[in-house]
Image (tube, grey):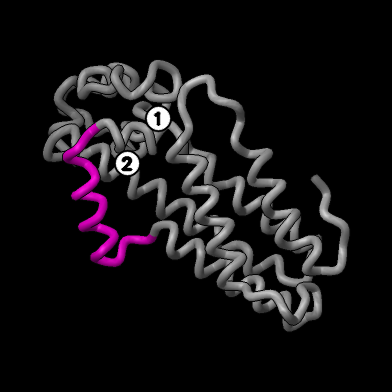
Amino acid sequence: MAPRGVATPDVRERLFAAAERIVERDGPGALTSRSVTTEAGCAKGLLHAHFAGLDVFVAELCLDRFARTAARARALATRVGEGTVAGNLEAMALGMFESGGAALTGLAMTRPAVSPLIRAALAGGAPAYDAVQETIAGYLEAERERGRVAAGVDPATVALAVVGTAHHLLMTAWPDAPDPRPALRRLVAALVAPAAGLPAQV
């Protein structure tokens, strides 16, 4: 634990990572300001020194992870013409389930004051699933120009289907539920492999 008067490096990320561990291990109900700082090994009042309450902390955590997902999605642009279209898209889509995706979605849903904070940030331009959707569409357009995706494929529709399905799977997850990722893999295979003239691998 950092002693009094000594700055704790990377405070936000340290607290965010601690919160993710708590939610994934013990569920949303176990998250309190005290449990976060204890898990992070920080002074008890550190969370409130950096955030205006637990709801603001949770909203900032979700927005930070949304931004991470959007940043990872942008790496698709470097994969144009490399590997397989289905493999590249699948790897990106499955990334939405990293950083405690399902657990954080459940956490936000259990705290009514969090959703308006997130909506306000998104309305102000904070990156989230819409940015991921735009990235996927742009990637598929580039692959279509190279002939690796059939000319008749609508990139925007495929992007909407992938992101919408991932969001649905995150929103309907619960503790001990079946792993949702195989369903997303099947969707990507069904949408992209036939479009490229390949048999779907399910």
**In the picture provided, is 72 more to the left or to the right than 58?**
right
Residue 108 coordinates in the image, percent (x, y): 30, 37
Tag 2: amino acid: Leu
Q: Viewer-proximal residue, 115 or 164?
A: 164
**Element type at mark 1:** helix
Q: Quadrant of residue 24?
A: top left
Mark 2 — residue?
A: 61
- Precedes in sequence: disc 1 or disc 2: 1
Vertical placement of residue 163 versus 34, above or below: below
Magenta segment includes 122: yes
Q: Quadrant of residue 54?
A: top left
User: Which segment is the magenta one?
Assistant: 111-127
The quarter of the rendered structure image containing the N terminus is top left
Question: Which residue is drawn at the image coordinates 25% and 55% (left, top)?
Answer: 119
Magenta segment includes 187: no
Question: Which residue is drawn at the image coordinates 30% and 39% (left, top)?
Answer: 12
